């Protein structure tokens, strides 16, 4: 169906790996932050909310640059991680996953927070009166009821990570086979003569993956809703 070169297929596979890892890492943090924003009142809550949503309003290149000067190989935090833990993010696919996770994080948090806010707190309070501690009430009441929002947040985060370009190329560059995702490959092909056909092929592949993710999200959300209502 798609006449892609081996290098193009590598870019597709790398994009899927980066998006999956970014979503998997961002999701537990997203659930925790969403719960805190939905259920807790504390000084600095508005600031935390602003910081969570900052990647949505900042130019992606700015986010990528901030990651570079913080976690780059010669940056203070990046140098410490490399020297003491052997962890290197800059110009690695793991750095691409980190950049995509940061950019996708607000889209993960928002639907989960809205789902938690829609849950009747009396259900959580009732479980506590029956002896459940805070964590058990969250795990058995809040988390299952928030499942549709968690699914929506996961799929939105995956779609954002799959298409991320600005932050990724700024932080980890555009290295074929290592950090060249679908978006970076399309950009490269548009800069070379006769690259339009190959670029369009990758555009179509990206659209197919994105549509499949959205359809899967809708199906999973409906299944979750049906289970919650006992259908």
Image (tube, helix red, strand yellow):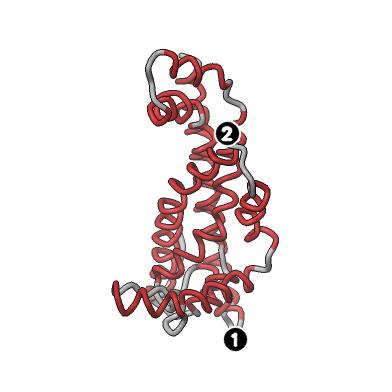
Counting from the top left corner in percent of width and height, residue 148 is at 52, 32
Residue picked out by circle 1: 193
Q: Is residue 180 above or below residue 121?
A: below
The reply, left or right, for residue 205 in relation to residue 133 is right
Count of residue discs:
2
Counting from the top left corner in percent of width and height, residue 213 is at 50, 46
Disc 1/disc 2 C-alpha distance (Å): 55 Å
Q: Nearer the viewer, residue 219 or 227?
A: 227
User: Farthest front residue?
Assistant: 43
Frontmost of labels 1 and 2 is 2
The reply, left or right, for residue 138 in relation to residue 53 is left
Q: Is residue 202 above or below residue 92?
A: above
Counting from the top left corner in percent of width and height, residue 195 is at 57, 79
Query: Which residue does the image show at 53% across and 79% down from the upper left?
Result: 69
Can I make out residue 231 in this image? Answer: no
Of the two numbered discs 1 and 2 on the same chain, state the one appearing first in sequence: 2
Judging from the image, what secondary structure is the residue with disc 2 in?
helix
Q: Nearer the viewer, residue 210 or 96?
A: 96
Query: Which residue does the image show at 55% across and 55% down from the upper left?
Result: 104
Residue 39 circle label: 2
Residue 180 circle label: none
Counting from the top left corner in percent of width and height, residue 225 is at 51, 24
Q: Nearer the viewer, residue 189 or 62?
A: 62
Dividing the picture into quadrants, the one containing residue 196 is bottom right
Query: Which residue does the image show at 44% across and 74% down from the upper left?
Result: 77
Crowding around mark 1 (Cα neighbors within 10 Å: few <14, some 14 to 19, many 20+) is few
- Which image quarter holds the N terminus? bottom left
Can I make out residue 88 in this image? Answer: yes
Q: Nearer the viewer, residue 87 or 218?
A: 87
């Amino acid at each position: 169906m798609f006449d892609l070169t081996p290098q193009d297929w590598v870019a597709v596979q790398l994009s899927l790996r980066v998006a999956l890892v970014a979503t998997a890492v961002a999701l537990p943090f997203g659930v925790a932050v969403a719960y805190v924003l939905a259920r807790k009142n504390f000084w600095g809550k508005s600031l935390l909310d602003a910081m969570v949503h900052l990647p949505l309003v900042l130019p992606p290149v700015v986010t990528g640059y901030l990651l570079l000067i913080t976690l780059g190989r010669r940056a203070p935090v990046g140098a410490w991680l490399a020297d003491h833990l052997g962890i290197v993010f800059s110009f690695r696919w793991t750095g691409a996953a980190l950049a995509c996770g940061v950019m996708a994080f607000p889209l993960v948090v928002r639907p989960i927070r809205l789902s938690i806010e829609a849950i009747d707190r009396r259900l959580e309070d009732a479980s506590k009166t029956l002896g459940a501690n805070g964590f058990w009430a969250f795990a058995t009441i809040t988390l299952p009821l928030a499942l549709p929002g968690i699914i929506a947040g996961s799929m939105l985060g995956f779609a954002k990570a799959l298409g991320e370009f600005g932050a990724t190329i700024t932080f980890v560059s555009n290295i074929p086979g290592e950090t060249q995702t679908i978006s970076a490959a399309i950009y490269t092909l548009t800069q070379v003569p006769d690259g339009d056909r190959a670029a369009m092929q990758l555009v179509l592949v990206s659209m197919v993956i994105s549509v499949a993710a959205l359809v899967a999200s809708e199906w999973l959300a409906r299944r979750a809703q049906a289970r919650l209502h006992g259908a």
